[in-house]
Every structure is written in C-alpha cells, then in structure tokens.
C-alpha cells in the first residue's frame, strides 16, 4: 500500500490546471453543430435547411479565427479543434448532402464522387495545417474547404428554391460540381484569402457602402447570389493561375 501511495500522479498538476479559451471555441463548436445539423436535415430530406446549415457553419468558422486573433486567445487546442470541426462541416457534411440529394440513384459513380470530395477535403485540411509557415498568406493553396462546401450547398439550395426536379441532367451537374470542388481543393491553384484585410485599420467611407450594398444584394435572393458568388470565386483561382502562366511566358 505504501508503494502505491508513493507513486507520482499520472498527470502533471500544471497540465491539469491548463484550460482552454472559451470565446473562440464557442464559435468553433457552433460551426460543428451547424455541420452536424446539416447532416441530420439531409437524412430527413430537408435539403434547404441542410444547405443553410453549411452556410451558417462557414460564417462561424470565419469568425472563430479572427476573434481568437483579435482577443489574443490563439492556442494549439483551438487550431486542432477547428480542423476537426472543418472536416465535419465542410468535408463529411457536404459529401453526404450531395449523395443523399442527387448522387444516390447514380449507383457506384454517385458514392465514388461523394467519397472523392470527402477524401480531398481531408487531404486539403492536412496539407493546410502542415504548410502554414511556408505559404503566402495572401493566397490559399487550392480551393478552401468552406468555399467548396458552399459551392455544393449553394447548388442544393438554389435547385430547391427554384423547384428544379432532380433528374438525370441535374444529377450529372451535381456529380460534376462535387468532383470539381474536391479536386480543386487539393490542387495548387492559388485562391485569394482576404487575410490581408485588417479590421483594426481605418477604411474609406465607400468601403462601408460596399459592405452594405453586398448585404442588400445577398438578402434580395440568397440562394442565387451566394451560389453565383461561390461559382465565381471557385473559377477565380483558375483565371489567376492562367494569367500568371501567360505573363511568365511573355517575360521569357
């Protein structure tokens, strides 16, 4: 008994006292819940609500990192938690939504397309975490997973809003967008990150007007505007890549 009492505790007391920052992780938990909610809604055939859940997760995911930097509450735990939340909300959830919504009747091709998206999301997140210190902060290497998820969810939301019947043509479009989004995530195509915007810095008055106009435009018809916006963003990287290739050839 004396030998048992003399043993050191398994956990260092300093480690037991170490906590986690509440505020940014609350937003990460909210994003995780929104992704889980999207999966549940898709399983119950409420695809419009599933798509909205993805967009809510995207907004919350964009806020948690900025809040952590503004309040100086960054942590290794928060970074790992954010990646796991992203895998659920922007990896598993969009793949499952697209499969249940349109790809399931396509048989093997359908579930392969969904798996390609899910696997590429995991690979993209793993590459992003390991390349943080060596990449240009102004650009993402490949399409970011929230934008890829929004591209898929936007198609679902738009089709449901317009009442488009899920027939062969739409299923092929859904399959193509799912595979395109997945492959673009793991490509080397640069996508502007918008990370050079400093929220603490003063901006011209017209910048506030642009934000207000953007909010009015989105609220006028969210399914159409959001889908077209993310289609444009998913193509912008290829336009930038082709422009750089053309300029490099001209300089030679």
Image (tube, helix red, strand yellow):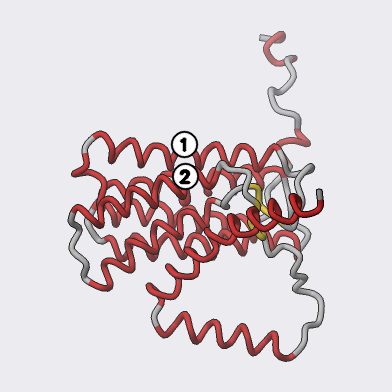
Residue name at image x 37 percent, y 46 percent: 95
- Compared across the picture, whether 162 is left or right of 227 comes to left
Q: Which residue is mark 2?
A: 182
Expressed as whole percent of the image width and height from the top left, the position of residue 245 reads: 69, 51
Vertical placement of residue 64 versus 111, above or below = below
Expressed as whole percent of the image width and height from the top left, the position of residue 249 reads: 74, 50
Q: Which residue is mark 1?
A: 119
How many C-alpha atoms fall within 10 Å of the one at disc 2: few (<14), some, or many (≥20)?
A: many
How many C-alpha atoms fall within 10 Å of the one at disc 1: few (<14), some, or many (≥20)?
A: some
Residue 251 showing in the rendered view: yes
- Report the mark closest to the observer, 1 or 2: 2
Residue name at image x 57 percent, y 51 percent: 143
Residue 2, by quadrant, is top right
Tag shown at residue 177: none
Instruction: Say whether marks 1 and 2 touch (CB < 8 Å).
Output: yes
Vertical placement of residue 161 versus 3, above or below = below
- Compared across the picture, whether 243 is left or right of 177 comes to right
Residue 63, by quadrant, is bottom right
Expressed as whole percent of the image width and height from the top left, the position of residue 226 reads: 45, 71
Which residue is at the front of the view, 114 or 198?
114
Residue name at image x 58 percent, y 55 percent: 238
Which residue is at the front of the view, 214 or 26?
214
Task: Report, in whole angstroms, how far the alpha carbon at label 1 lies from the one at label 2.
Answer: 8 Å
Secondary structure under tag 2 reads helix
Secondary structure under tag 1 reads helix
Vertical placement of residue 226 versus 61, above or below = below
């Amino acid at each position: 008994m004396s030998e048992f009492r003399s043993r050191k505790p398994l956990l260092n007391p300093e480690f037991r006292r170490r906590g986690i920052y509440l505020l940014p992780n609350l937003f990460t938990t909210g994003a995780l819940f929104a992704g889980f909610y999207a999966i549940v809604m898709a399983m119950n055939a409420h695809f419009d609500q599933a798509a909205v859940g993805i967009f809510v997760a995207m907004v919350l995911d964009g806020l948690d990192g900025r809040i952590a930097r503004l309040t100086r509450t960054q942590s290794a735990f928060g970074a790992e938690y954010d990646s796991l939340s992203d895998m659920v909300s922007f990896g598993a959830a969009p793949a499952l939504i697209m499969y249940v919504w349109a790809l399931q009747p396509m048989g093997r091709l359908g579930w392969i397309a969904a798996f390609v998206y899910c696997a590429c999301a995991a690979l993209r997140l793993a590459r992003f975490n390991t390349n943080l210190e060596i990449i240009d902060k102004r650009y993402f290497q490949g399409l970011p997973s929230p934008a890829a998820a929004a591209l898929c969810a936007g198609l679902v939301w738009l089709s449901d809003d317009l009442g488009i019947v899920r027939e062969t043509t739409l299923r092929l479009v859904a399959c193509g967008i799912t595979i395109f989004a997945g492959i673009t995530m793991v490509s080397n195509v640069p996508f502007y990150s918008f990370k050079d915007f400093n929220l603490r810095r003063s901006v011209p008055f017209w910048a506030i007007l642009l934000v207000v106009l953007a909010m009015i435009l989105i609220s006028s018809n969210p399914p159409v505007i959001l889908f077209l916006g993310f289609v444009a963003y998913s193509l912008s990287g290829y336009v930038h890549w082709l422009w750089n290739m053309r300029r490099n050839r001209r300089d030679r």
